[in-house]
Image (spheres, rainbow, N blue to C red):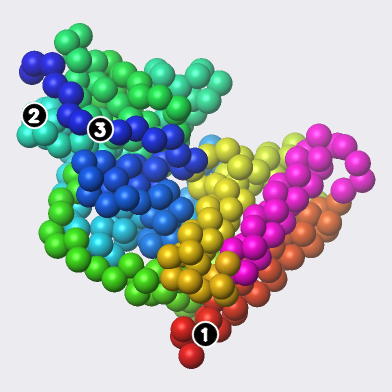
Amino acid sequence: MNQIENAFTHRQSSHCETGVVANMLTNQGRISMSEPMAFGLASALTFAYLPFVKINGLPLIAYRMPPKSIIKGVAKKLNMTVDSQKFSDPDKGMQALDDELAKGHCVGLQTSVYWLPYFPEDMRFHFNAHNLIVYGKNAEGDYLISDPVFEDVVTCNADSLKRARFAKGALAPKGLMYVLHDKNLDFDMNSLIYKSIKKTAKMMNGLPIPGIPFFGIKGIIYLAKQIESLENKPMKYKRLYLGNIVRMQEEIGTGGAGFRFMYASFLDEAATLTGDTELYELSKLTTEIGDKWRAFAMQAVLFCKNRKQISLGDIADTLRECGQMEKQLQTRLLSLSVFK
């Protein structure tokens, strides 16, 4: 394959999937889309405590909808199609990527952070749901990449990118690649915003599955009980468990407080677009919720480091406050004047 570089404007983002969606849509003059707007339109704000999905032997905790739901959600709202493919043969997966680049497409990929050499060594860990965009290939055969969490574009050699695309383990990407195609970009943005808000508010209460308290506000309260139940566990396990929660919340792509802040930005932008002052007030409440999640994480860290006199009960109580505030947000979102 000869050198190829498709036109692409890189923008740094706070989260990979929302950044990829917003950048792919904005690229080539499709739609001017901010990262918070992509997150809000996808109705991606949620909470899930998944004890049956283990990462490094500890339960997965997510603060957003599953990987790919943002891409699919935004595309569906905007009447676009997502042409996605997975591969069992890595060589065929890499050839398919080259073929799409040769057609002039910028291609989204799901990858493992661990095998991407442009990540600093201390940030490389086994997380398989990292999204990035490949927009070309240089004369040396290295891929030209727009990774949303980096300030500038980067390059990656073919062997490393292949390993990143076909890494094993939880959330294995299986070579997933995707391209967005336009159909009919004729839509009423105000209507889409309110539909997305209503869907988010309904989901915040959790999935309606009897006896399964792992999702939404019910999931937050359930996790608080799990934290209190650590009382009789060895201190090493307590620290691992709480440290895992903080890592899930603050460091990797499931980001807890960060997604609350992003949703606050979405509501703020939505208030400007629609002229609805209630949305602006709710954006302030959502920021306060993000602050409360940060306070929860700080308490957990201080407990792990044996700083100050913080008990498991204190941490669980702060988490319950997060749940109560999210319930208040849900109630106020569903009470918006436009829904009456």
In the drawing, what numbered circle is on residue 102?
2
Decide if residue 123 is in sight here. yes
Q: Are marks 3 and 2 in contact (CB under 8 Å)?
A: no
Secondary structure character of the magenta stretch overall: helix
Decide if residue 88 is in sight here. no
In the drawing, what numbered circle is on residue 337?
1
Return the disc, 1 or 3, that comes first in the chain's sequence: 3
Q: Are marks 1 and 3 in contact (CB under 8 Å)?
A: no
Residue at 26 percent of width and 22 percent of height:
144
Measuring from the top left, give residue 175's x and y in whole percent: 24, 36
Residue kind at label 2, given as amino acid type: Ala
- Left or right, 299 with reference to 8: right
Residue kind at label 1, given as amino acid type: Ser
Q: Does residue 90 lie above or below 233 as drawn? A: above
Residue at 8 percent of width and 16 percent of height:
2
Residue at 77 percent of width and 59 percent of height:
318
Q: Which residue is mark 3?
A: 8
SS at badge 1: helix
| Magenta highlight on residue 302 | yes
